[in-house]
Amino acid sequence: MSRRAFSLCFVAACFIAASMLPAIASSQSFLGQYKGLPYHDSRSQGGPQQIPGRVLCAHYDLGGEGVAYHDSDPQNHGSGELNPADGTYLNEFRIHEGVDTSYTKFNRKPDPVDDNPFDKVVPPADLLYVGWTEPGEWFNVTVDVAQSGTYAADFLYTSNRGGTISVDVNGKDATGPLEIATTKDPADPIAWRQWHHWNLAPQLFKVHLTKGKNVLTVHILTNGNMNLAYFDFKPVRE
């Protein structure tokens, strides 16, 4: 390589590095100021959720309203309301927090709930999820990324009327609006079960993540009426 070519390459590398500095600084600033903590309880080992892997929405961060999440009201409409406060782990999961949570129910008679014949995919039984979603709500999830790179996320969900969500990484929009296809099925004769037709959206989005701690923010943008179970992150070859 000639001296001139080397100089041009060096200048280009410096320019690229300099252009990345604001984004890096912004990310570090967000992480430095963030007061939320990874979820943990008697059944969860705690610590950031791992990527690659399934990031459970119901294991959103600890920290409360305005820090770890924003919800339209302080009542958990799943735990302690739809699901009776009977002392069981699933029925009382995060019962005193504003984010609405429930879990997939199997073998219920006479009408199947989450293992019904109108599922696009059958979810795992007793899978915790975030539900009763409304536009403007959001929640944070702290993750630990094994290696820097691009990851694709499959999304397990239900949606009574479609809508859009988005995902931030360390306080910065990383996806833009993501269209969530409705899972409503007029063939189902049971009206309330429109909220329980599960589907998997393969590679709903791709995002570049840096190694180590990151905070993902999931925003409900339009329509709501979605149940959010998990994002399954897998590395993408670049």
Image (tube, rainbow, N blue to C red):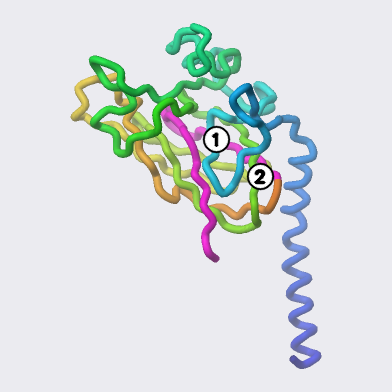
Magenta highlight on residue 219: yes
From the viewer's perspective, is 178 left or right of 144? left
Amino acid type at image mark 2: Asp
Q: Position of residue 6 (x, y in %)?
A: 77, 85
Which span of residues is magenta-colored? 213-238
Question: On the picture, is 102 further left or further right than 39?
Answer: left
Few, some or many residues within 10 Å of mark 1 (<14, 14–19, 20+): many
Q: Residue at x 78, y 78 (%)?
A: 10
| Residue drawn at the location 50% of the way across and 52% of the way down | 152
For this view, does 56 lie left or right of residue 32? left
Task: State yes or no: residue 35 in magenta.
Answer: no
Q: Where residue 146 sits: x, y (%)?
A: 64, 51
Q: Residue furthest bottom?
A: 2
Give the crowd class for mark 2: few <14, some 14-19, many >=20 residues within 10 Å: some
Image position, residue 51 (x, y; %): 59, 47
**Predominant SS along the magenta part:** strand
Q: Which mark is residue 219?
A: 1
Residue occupying the point 49% across, 18% down: 90
Residue 107 at what x, y percent from top left? 30, 21
Task: Please identify the quadrant where the C terminus is shown.
Answer: bottom right
The residue wearing badge 2 is 144
Vertical arrangement, residue 49 with respect to residue 73, above or below: below
Task: Tell me the quarter of the image containing the N terminus.
Answer: bottom right
- The residue closer to the viewer here, 197 or 47, is 47
Residue at the (23%, 31%) spot, across then down? 117
Q: Secondary structure at mark 1?
A: strand
* Location of residue 147 (image quadrant): bottom right
Instruction: Give the amino acid type for the residue marked by disc 1 in the picture.
Output: His
Q: Earlier in the sequence, mark 2 or mark 1?
A: 2
C-alpha gap between disc 2 and disc 1: 20 Å
